[in-house]
């Protein structure tokens, strides 16, 4: 289990528990975190589960694979810390992870 | 105007559920025409996740999106449904003779007794990039596809995107453009390597510009574009632009379904669970587009809905006939329809 904090664009925070092996996107949907749409259901085939990873967590979370980088082209306001949350898999290492949800998805 | 095609059933949407409806309707001798906005059959399975395995199709431990679509096409082949791709249904209207008139944005027209709406999450439409005020330029200076290349001749063209659409149109329009600028978020392209090489050669020869950045502002008036502001690593830059072509992929929108006079509930079509009929008798809705108590958006649920709706449509079309339910394993008449005997 890992604690994950989602901050929405209007500064609401959601502290939720994510199971090991689940994705950050699934954890957001399960806990009704607003702003994560996940239109394709986690296939890395849309860009509607876009989040910004907190700077301090960038190294542990790592960089997107090429396929995810391609999908990020379709996201809104892409920044160096942008990731698709369906491609971040939770492990104990990510306990305390903080991400921000963009103002809109696409 | 073209003479309408007369048929028993028009199916709107060629996703897995629309395709399986061809099978179920075919067993009842109902002929189908299928319309889809994409240029291929398969809906989300083909567009969003062709290579992804699906694990909850009964009888398949695993099958990819594209694999499922191919199997369905084989399964429905005996029924000879006709497909009308690359077009969106723009109108659905009940005529005085109780038939429905359906028109598409490509000018196809149909007259049918029964309509199956299997439109999934709605129609796939080009994504509008998040540039303030872009909608005021649409269809005058901003286009999401190229219908006629001549409309772009001698224009200052800006193309945005990094996939095959962006690259292909860059290569096709560059020879007739006054100037052409390709803008992409990063200096890596998803498109075919050969196209990328050709594009880079044109840049090196000074025949076009490539800018790495994002369009943040459009400048012009009355729908006529003059400039696009591009935010790059070096700062903001204005690019002369009288035609903008953004290629930001597809998104699902409910689209014209909302204009057909059917009751809707949060962009879904409420149906009963006996016939999967909408508020308009003769119009059925199956798959992800419908809603009812307990609804699950699963392909297998859509298949079940297709079977029941087809049965209901058969009974409605032939009110005086005794409709006898049969099994494909044992019915010689069904096996004849399937071309087995």
Image (cartoon, coloured by chain):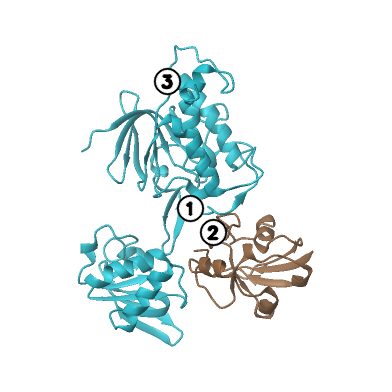
Chain colours: A brown, B cyan
**Measured Cα–Cα span from mark 1 to mark 2:** 9 Å
Question: Who comes first in sequence, dot 1 or dot 3?
Answer: 1
The image shows residue A8 at horizontal and vertical percentages of: 61, 68
In this picture, residue B142 sits left or right of residue B236: left
- Residue nearer the viewer, A71 or B113: A71
Q: Give me the disc on residue B317.
A: 3
Q: Give me the disc on residue B230.
A: none
The image shows residue B324 at horizontal and vertical percentages of: 53, 15
Q: Which residue is mark 1?
A: B47
Determine the residue located farthest toward the bottom in the rendered image: B234
| Mark 2 neighbour class, 10 Å CA radius: few under 14, some 14 to 19, many 20 or more | many
**Tags 1 and 3 on a common chain:** yes
**Measured Cα–Cα span from mark 1 to mark 3:** 34 Å
- Residue nearer the viewer, A48 or B175: B175
Q: Which residue is mark 2?
A: A45
- Residue nearer the viewer, B185 or B290: B185
Quadrant where the N terminus of chain B is found in the figure = top left
Task: Kindly tell me whether residue B222 is visible in this rendering.
Answer: yes
Task: Please name which of the two marks, 3 or 2, marks the residue nearer to the observer.
Answer: 2
The image quadrant of residue B218 is bottom left
């Amino acid at each position: 289990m890992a604690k994950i904090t989602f901050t929405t664009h209007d500064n609401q925070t959601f502290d939720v528990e994510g199971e090991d092996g689940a994705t950050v996107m699934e954890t957001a949907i399960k806990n009704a975190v607003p702003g994560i749409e996940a239109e394709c259901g986690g296939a890395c085939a849309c860009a509607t589960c876009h989040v910004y990873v907190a700077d301090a967590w960038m190294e542990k979370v790592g960089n997107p694979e090429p396929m995810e980088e391609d999908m990020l082209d379709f996201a809104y306001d892409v920044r160096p810390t942008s990731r698709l949350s369906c491609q971040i898999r939770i492990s104990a290492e990510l306990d305390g992870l903080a991400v921000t949800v963009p103002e809109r998805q696409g | 105007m073209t003479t309408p095609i007369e048929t028993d059933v028009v199916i709107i949407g060629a996703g897995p559920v629309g395709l399986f409806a061809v099978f179920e309707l075919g067993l009842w001798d109902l002929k189908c025409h299928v319309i889809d906005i994409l240029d291929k059959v398969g809906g989300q399975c083909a567009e969003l996740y062709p290579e992804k395995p699906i694990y909850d199709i009964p009888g398949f431990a695993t099958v990819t999106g594209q694999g499922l679509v191919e199997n369905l096409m084989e399964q429905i082949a005996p029924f000879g449904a006709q497909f009308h791709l690359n077009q969106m249904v723009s109108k659905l209207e009940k005529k005085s003779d109780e038939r429905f008139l359906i028109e598409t944005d490509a000018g196809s027209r149909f007259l049918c007794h029964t309509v199956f709406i299997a439109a999934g999450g709605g129609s796939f439409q080009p994504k509008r990039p998040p540039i303030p005020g872009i909608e005021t330029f649409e269809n005058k200076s901003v286009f999401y596809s190229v219908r006629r290349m001549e409309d772009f001749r001698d224009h200052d063209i800006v193309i945005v995107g990094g996939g095959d659409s962006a690259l292909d149109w860059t290569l096709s329009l560059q020879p007739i453009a006054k100037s052409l600028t390709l803008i992409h978020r990063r200096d890596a392209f998803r498109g075919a390597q050969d196209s990328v090489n050709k594009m880079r050669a044109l840049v090196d020869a000074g025949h076009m510009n490539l800018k790495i950045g994002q369009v943040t502002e459009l400048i012009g008036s009355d729908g006529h574009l003059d400039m696009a502001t591009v935010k790059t690593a070096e700062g903001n830059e204005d690019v002369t632009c009288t035609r903008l072509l953004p290629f930001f992929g597809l998104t699902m929108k409910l689209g014209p379904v909302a204009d057909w006079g059917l009751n809707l509930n949060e962009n879904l079509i409420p149906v009963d669970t006996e016939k999967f009929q909408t508020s308009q008798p003769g119009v059925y809705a199956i798959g992800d587009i419908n809603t009812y108590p307990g609804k699950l958006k699963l392909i297998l649920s859509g298949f079940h809905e297709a079977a029941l709706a087809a049965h209901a449509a058969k009974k409605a079309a032939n009110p005086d006939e005794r409709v006898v339910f049969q099994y494909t394993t044992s019915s010689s008449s069904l096996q004849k329809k399937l071309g087995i005997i």
